[in-house]
Image (cartoon, rainbow, N blue to C red):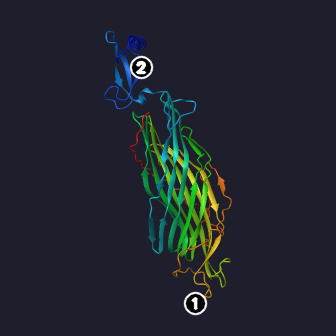
Amino acid sequence: MDFKDERSYQYGQRLWQWVNDADDRKFVLVAGNGHCGWNEHRLPFVVSNVLFSDAKNTISVIGYVSDWKTVAHTYELFVGGHPSSEKRDIDHTFSLDFNHALPLSSKSLSMGDFKFTYDCEDCGTKGEFDFQFELKTELFIPTGVSMTLSPQGVSANFNPRLGLSANFTGTKSDEMELGKIPIDGLTIPGGILDLGPEIVFSWGYALGPIVGTAGVSTGVSIGLEDSAELKIDLTSPDVSARGWTPKVTKKPITVDASISGGIKVNAKAAIQLALEALDTGFEIGLDLEPWAGATLTVASSSGAVCPDDPEKHHFGVNIAPSAGVNLNVEASEAGDENDPFLSKAIASLTMPLPSMCTGFGAPPNAAGSPKETTTKATSTPLPRFSTIPSSIVSSPTATFTTTTTATTTPFLSSSSSVSSIPVSSPYPYVRRKRHIARPNGQAHA
């Protein structure tokens, strides 16, 4: 280091002579970007000897390059913000992009006489999550590790249409991953931080028993308040959440033919984070899961099967719809994602909707209308989508619960005439093995 004036040189000489006075004395010198020519990032050097040139006002330090994990034994690391009491020249927030379409145009399943098609238009998520991470270490031992997520304009839209054709007496449920979307992460070189986030989309269903052939459409939109905050303590471990009451908007259910049975479909958008800071690594997941379901019961009568049907159809379907959303969080140590040390439901909202009835077939006074009365499902071609008026689908008061364990809410009405429909267990949560794709985004400390 060449000093421009004598006074500055003498000050450095007095300060650093200390390291030459004893063999075991060392200090850490942090070199700036490119200060040694070859180093591309801020690197720590462990200095054990210093040479002084009085004639040239030059100081040469002698040592070896190290890494932050080795030299930083006691520190506090804040990413995406820091406490307001701490003042820094640079203070930027870090956000996770949540603007993505559900990567699914259609899906079909066929098992014997059971056929099931699934379509979802205008389905996806919007907004972003502000992210913060804090790591405190004393003498190389982590004493505090936490992560905070706050939604900003976050919403999800789920509008599935199901095509069902079955004489299926059992039940079936499954969840399928649709795809992974890597989003910009954060890397602080030198092994300080590596954050690899991605959005993982999946969809699931629970069906049965199903008798008949029909198309069923429904939908649900949810939104989160910007004031919500989720803090995950990875040391204790624990989760604290506030303001996570979702706003749920239901859409009218439509059925286009006589069918009986129970249905439930859900979409899941999971934020998966692979985070490693100074050799401390975690896998963290936040699952946002809107769902919609209904119990469908075939009805028939010698008169009008639905009391509000102006055409007085003899055949119809009684519908008991419901909708809701689940939010879950889990965390595990890096490499042990199948054995999470933290798994909690932070919110669960179920919204039962008023029962309704829709009639089918030609009205009784129409030419060629059927005269018999039967509960057998019909597959006669019918006009598509006799939509239930949205005025019938009122919005009852929602029941919101914040829990520390997974909640269980039935999605099918226990008053259904189809006695073999399971009414006590919701669509099961299925844990996946995550494969994290590292993004190329970088940032410097």
> Pointer 1: what residue?
367
Label 2 packing within 10 angstroms: few (<14), some (14-19), many (20+): some
Q: Which mark is residue 27?
A: 2
Q: Seen from this angle, which residue lies furthest front?
A: 4
- Residue at (53%, 52%) from the top-left corner? 287
Disc 2 marks a residue whose amino acid type is: Phe
Indicate the position of residue 295 as horizontal and vertical percent values: 60, 69
- On the rendered image, what quadrant is the C terminus found in? top left
- Residue at (31%, 9%) from the top-left corner? 55
> Is 436 placed left or right of 226 in the picture?
left
Mark 1–mark 2 Cα distance, whole angstroms, equals 99 Å
Indicate the position of residue 137 as horizontal and vertical percent values: 50, 30
Q: Nearer the viewer, residue 34 or 282?
A: 34
Taking 116 as reference, is 147 above or below it? above
Give the image quarter of residue 177.
bottom left
Give the image quarter of residue 242.
top right
Do residues under tags 1 and 2 come within 8 Å of each other at their CB atoms?
no
Q: Is residue 421 visible?
A: no
